């Protein structure tokens, strides 16, 4: 937003609501959201302290919180190790032989680990890291696909108190090098290849290029998967399983202060060097564990699957750490969600009886593109909850998913969060009404608000800046090596954490996230969020996905240009283009009508699937976008 008196115009309304199935609502962990929320914000220390007592601590905390904004500590003086709760806590119970991890690869491979087997593997890798000199506080970069070895490496680092920095195994050598240099990693763990769309994609050459002339890297551990094993060179390269197999399966969890770093996860903004978001053992564990129960409703009998990757915060929080802390059975799969065909996802749901699933709106819109041919082929009745996050979930995509995937046996639940806040912040809980187009309500313990530039709350129905009034345990502690950059996010609205997003709250208290503040379009004096216009376009029966940008205009300031992907079976035509324009005009009125509609086969996206509108805008204006395609928002 440019000045404090400019308003975001909200043009759409929720046209339809959905109630959770009675069977779901009756058995959810969180039954009375409003009662719990009121208690949680009235006395946050009592709320979070009560949740923390459900977990194992090596030494109890002296105080639940110590807040001196922008800095905050949780479970002060407490000693803990997140792997103690993800592994040891379970193998001392009947869960010892429960399936912890089901790993699949698009090439047909499958491996299954019980909690006991996973704990042994983690201990062996932890001892392997110790044997090459990795100590508490050392940084280890993990550049691996979503494999058991990748997950085991993350847990092994945490086990001994090393700080892991996972880099998505799809980023190029430049992105990898900047993260290695910023973290000053001592060791890199990588794979020789990853599998995607039927191809073996080399990873080791990317690592070689990234660390050329980097002298502080002591060892490179290589998980060699290819039939023809690559040669290891120069004495600092080690084979993953040669190191692993030589170790004992006994390794005590390091005693960690609750505020000791667990991991650094780098996230790129639109400009500048990547920022290393730091999360810690204690508060991160407690917050993500609670939301695994309260939002994902994970129970002992559940089979849980997130289609994300360990390279993103979703993979950290809701593939690896919190599902294991919760004692769940976790499915993960290496490869594209639509390979070998768009039914691949639903084949997994049927085969393994997946009950709770987490995916991204971009995947949902891809499923929509191909219609019901592939969704109807498989039995999806096991699916109780399907959660979406990553960017706004268009109402039409929500309705399509509820009708064709969840039907009357499951429930679609939207949610909003970000790397900096490592779990849901705003969510549609399984116990409340779903309002498509609204991400939901603030999660217990989190005081969200929508304000103008002066920090004054705006009225319901008026757009503004989305902030968090007080820190929560699972928020970042700092930006690695750059505390001033961290402090800035608390300075836009003094005393509050600014998410960087614009949002609106309706009369029911539900919040819609309308897009990044930088993506707001100014059309004839009206400031409009991209998400609202994109949702209107996607509600056209021929459209699968859309992105819009503001294009400079001498008269209106900006006009809207839309980039549209059509659903399967639809052909591009001037008549269809005019139909889409009329549809948006009918849905949102003349101010939001696109001046241009172009049909495209794909949209530029971050590695985690978010649409990069800045790339579309830069291309439209003839600007240099540089290496922006490798970035993640």
Image: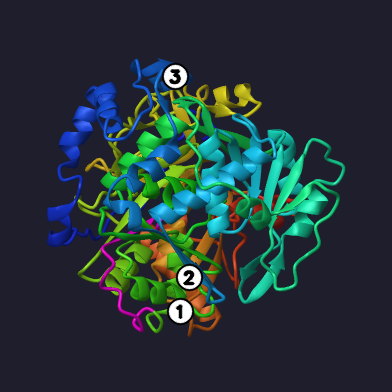
Q: Quadrant of residue 532?
A: bottom left
Q: Write the residue at 46% across / 76% down.
A: 344
Which residue, given by chain and number where applicable, does mark 3 sit on? 495
Is 81 placed left or right of 555 in the picture?
left
SS category of the residue bearing label 2: helix
Which residue, given by chain and number where applicable, does mark 2 sit on? 366
Q: CA distance from mark 1 to mark 3?
A: 47 Å
Relative depth, front residue between 28 and 484: 28
Q: Residues within 10 Å of mark 3 (few under 14, many from 20)?
A: some
Q: Is residue 561 above or below residue 336?
A: above
Is the stretch drawn in magenta largely helix, strand or loop?
loop
User: How far from the left and from the top, in percent, is residue 521?
Assistant: 53, 47
Q: Residues within 10 Å of mark 2 (few under 14, many from 20)?
A: some
Q: CA distance from mark 3 to mark 2?
A: 40 Å
User: How far from the left and from the top, in percent, is residue 42?
Assistant: 23, 23
Which residue, given by chain and number where applicable, does mark 1 sit on? 370
Q: Write the residue at 75% across / 37% down.
A: 181
Q: Write the residue at 37% across / 50% down.
A: 323
Q: Are marks 1 and 2 in contact (CB under 8 Å)?
A: yes
SS category of the residue bearing label 1: helix
Q: Is residue 246 above or below residue 278?
A: below
Is-magenta flag for residue 202? Answer: no
Instruction: Magenta stretch: give its range.
Output: 375-393
Relative depth, front residue between 471 and 155: 155
SS category of the residue bearing label 3: loop
User: How far from the left and from the top, in percent, is residue 608?
Assistant: 55, 55
Q: Residues within 10 Å of mark 1 (few under 14, many from 20)?
A: some
Q: How is the image coloured?
A: rainbow
Q: Write the residue at 82% across / 52% down.
A: 209
- Residue 288 shows in the view: yes
């Amino acid at each position: 937003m440019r000045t404090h008196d400019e308003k975001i115009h909200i043009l759409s309304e929720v046209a339809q609501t959905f109630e959770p199935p009675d069977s779901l609502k009756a058995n959810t962990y969180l039954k009375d959201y409003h009662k719990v929320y009121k208690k949680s914000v009235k006395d946050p220390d009592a709320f979070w302290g009560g949740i923390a007592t459900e977990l194992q601590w090596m030494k109890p905390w002296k105080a639940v919180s110590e807040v001196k904004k922008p800095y905050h500590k949780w479970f002060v003086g407490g000693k803990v190790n997140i792997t103690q709760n993800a592994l040891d806590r379970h193998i001392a119970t009947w869960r010892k032989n429960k399936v912890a991890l089901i790993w699949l690869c698009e090439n047909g491979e499958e491996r299954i680990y019980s909690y006991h087997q996973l704990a042994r593997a983690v201990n062996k890798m932890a001892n392997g890291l110790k044997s090459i000199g990795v100590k508490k506080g050392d940084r280890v970069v993990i550049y691996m696909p979503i494999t058991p070895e990748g997950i085991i490496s993350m847990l092994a680092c945490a086990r001994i108190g090393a700080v892991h920095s996972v880099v998505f195994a799809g980023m190029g050598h430049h992105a990898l090098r900047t993260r290695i240099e910023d973290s000053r990693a001592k060791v890199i763990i990588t794979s020789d290849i990853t599998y995607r769309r039927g191809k073996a994609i080399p990873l080791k050459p990317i690592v070689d290029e990234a660390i050329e002339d980097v002298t502080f890297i002591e060892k490179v551990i290589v998980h060699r998967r290819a039939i023809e094993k690559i040669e290891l060179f120069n004495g600092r390269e080690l084979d993953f399983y040669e190191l692993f197999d030589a170790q004992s399966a006994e390794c005590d969890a390091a005693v960690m202060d609750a505020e000791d770093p667990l991991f650094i996860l780098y996230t790129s903004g639109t400009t500048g060097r990547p920022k290393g978001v730091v999360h810690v053992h204690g508060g991160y564990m407690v917050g993500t564990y609670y939301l695994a129960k309260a939002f994902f409703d994970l129970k002992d009998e559940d089979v849980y699957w997130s289609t994300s990757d360990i390279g993103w915060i979703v993979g950290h929080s809701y593939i690896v750490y919190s599902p294991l802390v919760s004692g769940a059975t976790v499915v993960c799969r290496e490869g594209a969600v639509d390979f070998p065909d768009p039914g691949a996802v639903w084949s997994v749901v049927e085969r393994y009886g997946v009950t709770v699933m987490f995916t991204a709106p971009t995947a949902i819109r891809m499923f929509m593109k191909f219609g019901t041919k592939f969704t109807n082929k498989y039995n999806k009745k096991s699916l109780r909850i399907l959660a979406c996050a990553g960017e706004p979930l268009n109402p039409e995509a929500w309705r399509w998913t509820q009708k064709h995937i969840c039907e009357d046996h499951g429930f679609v639940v939207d949610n909003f969060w970000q790397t900096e806040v490592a779990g849901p912040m705003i969510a549609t809980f399984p116990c409340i009404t779903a309002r498509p187009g609204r991400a939901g309500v603030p999660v217990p313990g989190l005081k969200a608000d929508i304000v103008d530039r002066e920090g004054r709350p705006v009225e319901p129905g008026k757009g503004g800046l989305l902030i968090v009034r007080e820190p929560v345990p699972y928020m970042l502690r700092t930006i690695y090596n750059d505390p001033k950059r961290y402090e800035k996010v608390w300075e836009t609205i003094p005393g509050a954490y600014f998410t960087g997003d614009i949002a609106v709250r309706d009369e029911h208290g539900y919040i819609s996230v309308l897009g990044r503040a930088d993506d707001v379009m100014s059309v004839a004096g009206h400031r409009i969020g991209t998400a609202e216009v994109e949702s209107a376009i996607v509600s056209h029966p021929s459209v699968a996905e859309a992105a819009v940008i503001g294009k400079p205009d001498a008269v209106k300031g900006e006009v809207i240009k839309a980039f549209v992907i059509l659903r399967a079976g639809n052909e591009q035509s001037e008549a269809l283009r005019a139909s889409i324009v009329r549809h948006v005009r009918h849905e949102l009125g003349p101010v939001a009508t696109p001046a241009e509609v172009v049909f495209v086969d794909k949209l530029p996206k971050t590695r985690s699937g978010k649409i990069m509108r800045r790339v579309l805008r830069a291309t439209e204006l003839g600007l240099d976008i540089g290496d922006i395609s490798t970035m993640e928002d």
